[in-house]
Each structure stands twice: as C-alpha cells, then as structure tokens.
Image (spheres, helix red, strand yellow):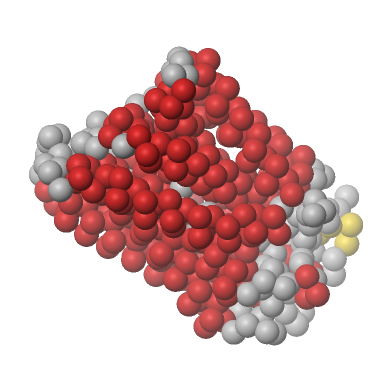
Amino acid sequence: MPIEQRGVDTVPEAERTSGPRDLVAILLGSNLCLGVIVFGWLPVSFGLGLWASVTSVVTGTLVGVAVTAPLALVSLRTATNLSTSSGAFFGVRGRLVGSVVGLLLSLGYTALTLWIGGDVMVGTLARLVGLPTGGATHAVVYALLAACTVVGAVYGYRLLLKLSKALAVGMTLLLALGLLAYAGDFTTAAVPDTPYLLGSFWPTWLLSAVAAGLSGPVAFITLLGDYTRYVSPERHSSRSVWRATCLGLLVGLLIPQLFGTFTALAARGSLDYAGPLVDASPAWYLVPLLVAATAGSVGNAGLMLYSMGLDLDAILPRATRARATLVVAAVATAFVFLGHFASDAQSAMTSFVLLLTAIGTPWAVITLIGHLRCGGVYDPEALQVYNRRSRGGIYWFSAGWHPRATASWAIGAAVGLAAVSTPLYEGPLIALTGGIDCSFVLSGIVGGTLYAVLTPNRAPAAGTAAEALVPAE
C-alpha cells in the first residue's frame, strides 16, 4: 500500500470513494482503546457510583454528539480537512485558529492513549513474564508503541481505515471477554471509597458529564473532516453522512467509556486505573488484555497522529504531511514521558479536557453557524490560498483574517477559561456559577452570539465577486 501523499489540499472527486459505513467503522474501531476506556474511570475517581457515572457519561456524550456531528458535513462539501475549511469563516489565514486547536486536542489525546496503553502493557507483561516495572521499562514500551503508531499515521487514511475495520470487530470481542473476566468482582463491588471531588453530588455529576462525557465528541471537532473529505456528496447524502457520524460517535464512545466505568468499579480503581485493572484481571484474560492495550492504542493514536500531521501541514505549508507527522509524533511521545513521570493522572486528564473544551467549543459553534449561513456552498480553490502561498479570493477578508470571527472566538475562549474549574486551576467566574464548571456552555454561547451579531451578513459563497488570486509577495 503506497504512502498517502495528500495533505490538506482538495481531494479530487475520483479519490472520494469512502461512504457512511466507513465513517462508522473508523469512529468505532479507533475508539475501542484504553485511551477512551479510561474516561469511564474518571466519574468513579470523582466519587460517583455506578448509575451516577453512567448517567453523567451518557448525558455528556449525547450533548457532545449533537454539537459535534454536524461538523462532518463541512468537509463533505469542501473536500479538505476541517481546519482548512474553517477559512471560509475565519479567513484563509485565520483558519490557523482551527489548526492550532486541532493540533492541541490531538496531541493531548495521543499522549493519553500511549500513556495508559503503555502502563497496562507493562503491568500485564509483569504478571505474564515477570517484566520489571521501572522507569526504563515504561520508556521502552512507550517508544515501541509510538513507533508502531507512526507507521499507520504516515501511511495515511487508507491503512488506518483498514485497521479500524479490523479493530471494530476484534476489540469488540476483547471487551466482551472483559465483561466476563471482571463480572465476578463487579457483583460485589461497592461504591467508590472516595468523597465527591467537588464536595457534593450535583457539581461532581456535572463535572463528570463534561470531563468524561462531553469531552469525547469534542475531541473530534477538528478530526471528522479528515474522514468525510474522502466521502463524495454526489453519491452520499448529507443526511446519511450525519446519521453515520452520530452512530459512530455514540457507539464508538459509549461502549469503551461504560466498559471503563464497569471495570473501574470491579477493580476498585478509584485512585488509579491501569494498576488495579491489571491486578484484578484473571490469569486467562491477561493475554487478551495485552492485545487490547497494544492494538487499540496503535489504532486510536494512529488516527490522532494522522490528524496532527494534517494540522501541522496546514500551519507549515512547506512541510510534507509525512514529515509533519514524524515531528508531532516526537512531541507526543515527550508528553507521554512528562505525563508518566511528572503528573497525577486524574488531575492531568481533567484539567486537559476541560481547558481544551473551553477553547475548542466556540470555534466549533462559529464554524457551524458559518456553514448554515452559506448553505454548505464553498469555493474549494479559494480555501487553498494559504497552502499555495498566494493571496486574494473570497475568503481573504482582511489580510487573510476575518477579524470579527477571530475576535468572537478569542472572547468566547477567554470567557470559557475564566469559568473553568479544574484540579489545577479555577477561573475567576467560577464563583458566579456556584462552583459548577459551565465553561463549555459559556464559551460556546458567547463566541457564537458575538459572531452572529458582529457578522449579520451571510458568509461568502462560491460565485461571489472576489479579488483575484495572486502569488504572495
């Protein structure tokens, strides 16, 4: 299979051979991994019991899917990734906002997947063959996982799609076996022995809904276009693509997250997940657990690295996608070492997802408003101005930026950060919300409202009179 040469340029119609079933497969297969499973542990670590954990995760996921899934339709129309597509509203240079947001999201989730997957691999191998569990062992395992991940990411979309299809079947079977493996402990599992993280039930439940539930779909706000750009709008309707995206996100996120809640309670892992998960595993499930930790991590982190390579390629047009992927892989691996040796898992995960959700939500809302305004009609050539080091076109706005859209995002993100409540940081607005983290709601409402008010006219569409494209000076 040849290495994918295409970066964030427009995908020709002849290459857009994927369909809705492929979307479901890639969203299901890539998410059946420990990097997503561990989010089901978060509610338990916050002090919530079974039903409180389940309801918070399900509620947050449903809300997140409702906001995130329509973004898949943008790249269906533009034939490029979402950050580049957002240039229709932020400007061909202003779309760097989306590239940076996507790069940060993918970087964090890649590091998390390699981190938790590597820890479970080390613990499982320690029980199976007596492998030492020191820092050197973790470093070698992280590096091996990262290397395997890079191969899939560099080869690109077609290989990752085949891998996701295989993982959708294989990982489902492995998780089903896991339910049997931990069922005996779960029947006697008590409620978590930790107090509510925020002192009382409802604030902690809402925190769980955002950090464990909503964060899953939000992680895809810039990723969905990586897949739908290969789907042809001439052969597949927007409705079928939207339905497939909703199904893929719901099934692909809820299955692993709820498995994480189940096993966290069964293993009594309120303070840690990887260690208790391995310790509570019956001997016969250790090999399946090792396979799940390895294959699932490579599949999920591979897609994240692929997206990071595209985002860095969009930021640095002179870089090839393959070279950009190697760079971000090295950075992600460095974050893995930092996370293992210098951070508390619960605090790091919670802070990371809440902060990036506050930053990413207003960008997603503005992009959706712009998509609705233009009726899904874009000028693909004008979107590629920055990548071709030219200037002009209908999305040039002011020197390649749409100042009002960019300001709307920046203010929305600032309000979100001021209203966030994490174990490491609390914004000044948290006192006005009764100690409840409403950062994603406030950031989305403020950013979207400002954009709608400041830009009352419809977004420019293909066919609009525009400045001619000329080479950049």
Given residues 102 and 419, the one toward you in this image is 102
Identified at 35% across, 48% down, the residue is 178
Report if residue 88 is visible in the image: no
Q: To which quarter of the image does residue 234 belong?
A: bottom right
Given residues 31 and 48, the one toward you in this image is 31
Side (left or right) of 337 relative to 6: left
Q: Where is residue 218 in the image (x, y as percent from the top left)?
A: 44, 56
Identified at 60% across, 69% down, the residue is 22
Side (left or right) of 25 relative to 269: right
Report if residue 20 is visible in the image: yes
Identified at 23% across, 48% down, the residue is 183
Given residues 312 and 144, the one toward you in this image is 144
Q: To which quarter of the image does residue 61 belong?
A: bottom left
Given residues 382 and 148, the one toward you in this image is 148
Q: Where is residue 148 in the image (x, y as percent from the top left)?
A: 64, 38
**What quarter of the picture does the N terminus occupy?**
bottom right
Q: Position of residue 331 (x, y in %)?
A: 61, 31
Q: In this picture, is 33 found above or below 114?
A: below
